[in-house]
Amino acid sequence: MSNFTGGSNFEELKKDGKSKLGEEIRDNRIYMGGIPYNMSEADVRKMCESFGRLKSFNLIKDTASPDLNKGYAFFEYSDDRSTDKAIKALNGLEFKDKRLKV
């Protein structure tokens, strides 16, 4: 027997950012823009991993030129402390003639 009711997990969230159980909900997904277009996925990932273990990582690639990226990525850390450290260290950082925006 399935308990699926057709609803989404969002039904469990309240407008105050807490679950029905009163736990704080925190979104650890990070957007980073201003990445040099010729920077490899491995190099961007390595830079992000220097702040902690990644839960997910997605560098947006240029479909017309597979060796290039579109200058932005989305990633998420396993813990909040890594998220905070990365945002503080990377936001505004000048890197290869570009300024990162996190």
Image (cartoon, rainbow, N blue to C red):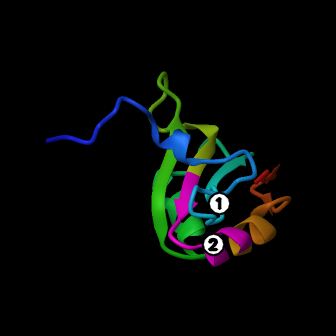
Looking at the rendering, in which quadrant would you find the N terminus?
top left
The span picked out in magenta is 75-84
Q: Residue furthest top?
A: 64
Q: Give how far across and how far down residue 34 sits, in percent.
A: 74, 45
Q: Name the residue rendered at 55%, 59% in the picture.
A: 76
Q: Name the residue rendered at 47%, 38% in the picture.
A: 67
Identify the residue position indicated by label 1 in the image. Answer: 26
Taking 92 as reference, is 38 above or below it? Answer: above
Does residue 82 belong to the magenta stretch? Answer: yes
Please name whichever residue, 76 or 34, is drawn nearer the observer in this view of the structure.
Answer: 76
Q: Give how far across and how far down residue 62 sits, in percent.
A: 53, 29
Please name whichever residue, 26 or 5, is drawn nearer the observer in this view of the structure.
Answer: 5
From the viewer's perspective, is the residue at label 1 or at label 2 nearer? 1
Say if residue 91 shows up in the picture: yes
Identify the residue position indicated by label 2 in the image. Answer: 80
Contact, mark 1 vs mark 2 (Cβ under 8 Å) = yes
Say if residue 35 shows up in the picture: no
Does residue 29 belong to the magenta stretch? Answer: no
Taking 47 as reference, is 35 above or below it? Answer: above
In the structure shown, which secondary structural element does the residue marked by tag 2 occupy? helix
Please name whichever residue, 74 or 60, is drawn nearer the observer in this view of the structure.
Answer: 74
